[in-house]
Amino acid sequence: MNRFIKRFLLIIGILVVAGIIFFLGVFLKLRTEIGRMHPVETKLITDRIYSIHDTMVNAYLIRYNGGYIMIDAGNDPEIVSQELEKLNINENEITAVFLTHSDYDHVASIPLFDNAEIYLNKEELPMINGSQARLLIQYNKIDTDQYNLFVDGQSFNFQDITIRCIHTPGHTPGATCYIVNDQYLFTGDALSLHDGKVNEFIKLATMDLETHRNSINKIGSIPNIEYIFTAHHGMSDDFDFAFSDWQESE
């Protein structure tokens, strides 16, 4: 019996050590990847597009006569509020928030925007209604139950602004890119940019890597894009150069 207990404890000890090593490896890998992120500083980028720098992530604003449309809602409400103040933009002027997906660092500041309609791909709904876990027993949520669901290819008009929704799953099931006026592409975490070139997003944070790669190929076939705006890896004003070396990783 003592022999059995010793063996059992040994196996448990080995499993615990292996688990610690595994999670330490994951932590170090994620820390390295986060260190490679390079979001754009808070500023006016074009005559009507603004970036908001919130710790490791960007949200974006598009100005139109009726106010501002926001792409994603940031990681820290206090920082987002401060950055909006730097731009002399009032939170009440934001009339719509389009979410690329439901991870916390893209939705945290939704409660700031009382006047905004929230838009989300219907394929992302399982991520926030408890049907599908983001990781093991971790579930996503957004701080509102008032949101508008859309489908792939659907468009929304805001006076002279048209936003087209492109379903690009992989990072999450409902991950979506937005094309504004057929020129400006907002990708969320559908891809990364390093030295101006497209690559995959962090593999450890991507739920379906093969689907993610297929979505990048889909994005690469979109015509007439002048700017690419990512959530964590800056921007590019040269679409062809950005995709020139893209290959699906094996």
Image (tube, rainbow, N blue to C red):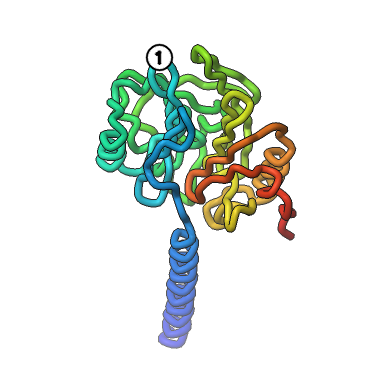
Q: Which of 97 and 63 is in front in this view?
A: 63
Q: Relative to 64, does residue 102 appear above or below in the rendering? A: below
Q: Position of residue 128 (x, y in %)?
A: 45, 34
Q: Where is residue 148 in the image (x, y as percent from the top left)?
A: 48, 19
Direction from residue 167 to residue 247 in the image, left or right = right
Task: Kindly identify the residue that appears in the image at 59 percent across and 23 percent down.
Answer: 181
Q: Relative to 165, does residue 2 appear above or below in the rendering? A: below
Q: In which quarter of the image is the N terminus?
A: bottom left
Q: How crowded is mark 1: few (under 14 residues within 10 Å), some or many (20 or more)?
A: few
Residue 86 falls in image quadrant: top left
Q: Nearer the viewer, residue 43 or 37?
A: 43
Q: Where is residue 167 in the image (x, y as percent from the top left)?
A: 63, 32
Task: Kindly identify the residue that appears in the image at 44 percent across and 35 percent down.
Answer: 60
Task: Kindly identify the residue that appears in the image at 35 percent across and 50 percent down.
Answer: 55
Q: Name the residue under label 1.
A: 66
Q: Position of residue 78 (x, y in %)?
A: 25, 40
Disc 1 marks a residue whose amino acid type is Gly
